[in-house]
Amino acid sequence: MKFFVDTADIEAIRELNDLGLLDGVTTNPSLIAKSGRDIQEVLEEICDMIDGPVSAEVVATDCETMLEEGRKLAGIAPNIAVKVPMTFDGLRACRSLTHEGKMVNVTLCFTTNQALLAAKAGATFISPFVGRLDDIGEDGLKLVSDVRQVYDNYGYETQILAASIRSTAQMTACAKIGADVATAPPAVIKAMADHELTDKGLSAFLADAEKAGIRIV
């Protein structure tokens, strides 16, 4: 499973990328706004750092303006994936941008039917939102699983990009289901390295090394 980080924080991206953990980045208008910086400036900096796809979202809701914005975003760097909403206008824009050779990430997916439509429209990525479904009492991971089954049934090439990931347990579940990609905030990705027994074992090893006078120089 590929790891994308869901942030526009340059330092957080750099830290994970330097460890070789990142395959891409996802952003959205809220994350760009949180950075307090110009969208083009932020995206240029991220794309210079990351070789993989960098999702950049349009803010228009009609197809024609989405196309204008999408083309402008895609012009920033060749690894930009234009992010469009899962609406009929978004699907129209997806179809056109895909035919132009651009990567497209259809976002805000909450049903298997929506994922089917995105695949038919030629989306590079479909982003089912796990956490937001859980928030309303539905099963976000089941959606990822259902989309995986349907895509496999028919050989769709659209990649499942599990989004709105809130925990390390959800990351594990997405990997077991077979999501192509999972995108998560930096804190969730970093927390995947944590376990209380790792900390306990390390403390014991260091204490024994200290008692034995072990030094490695």
Image (spheres, rainbow, N blue to C red):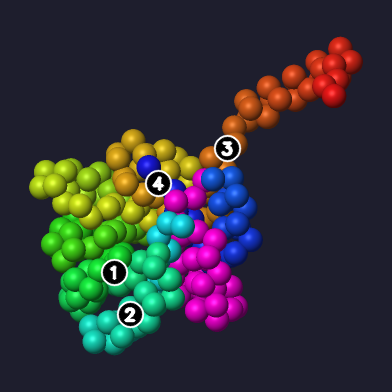
Q: Position of residue 89 (x, y in %)?
A: 20, 79
Tell me the CA gap for discs 1 and 3: 35 Å
Q: For mark 2, give the secondary structure.
A: helix
Residue shown at 68%/29% (left/top)?
199
Spatial distance from mark 2 to mark 1, Cα to Cα?
8 Å
- Left or right of 205? Residue 195 is left
Q: Position of residue 187 (x, y in %)?
A: 57, 51
Give the mark nearer the N terminus: 4 vs 2: 4
44 part of magenta stretch: yes
First reached walking from the N terminus: tag 2 or tag 1: 2
The part of the chain drawn in magenta is 21-50
Q: Which mark is residue 2?
A: 4
The residue that appears at 60% across and 49% down in the rendered structure is 18
Q: Is label 2 in contact with label 1 (beta carbons under 8 Å)?
A: yes
Specify whether residue 20 is in view: yes
The residue type indicated by label 2 comes to: Arg
- 56 with respect to 95 (left or right): right
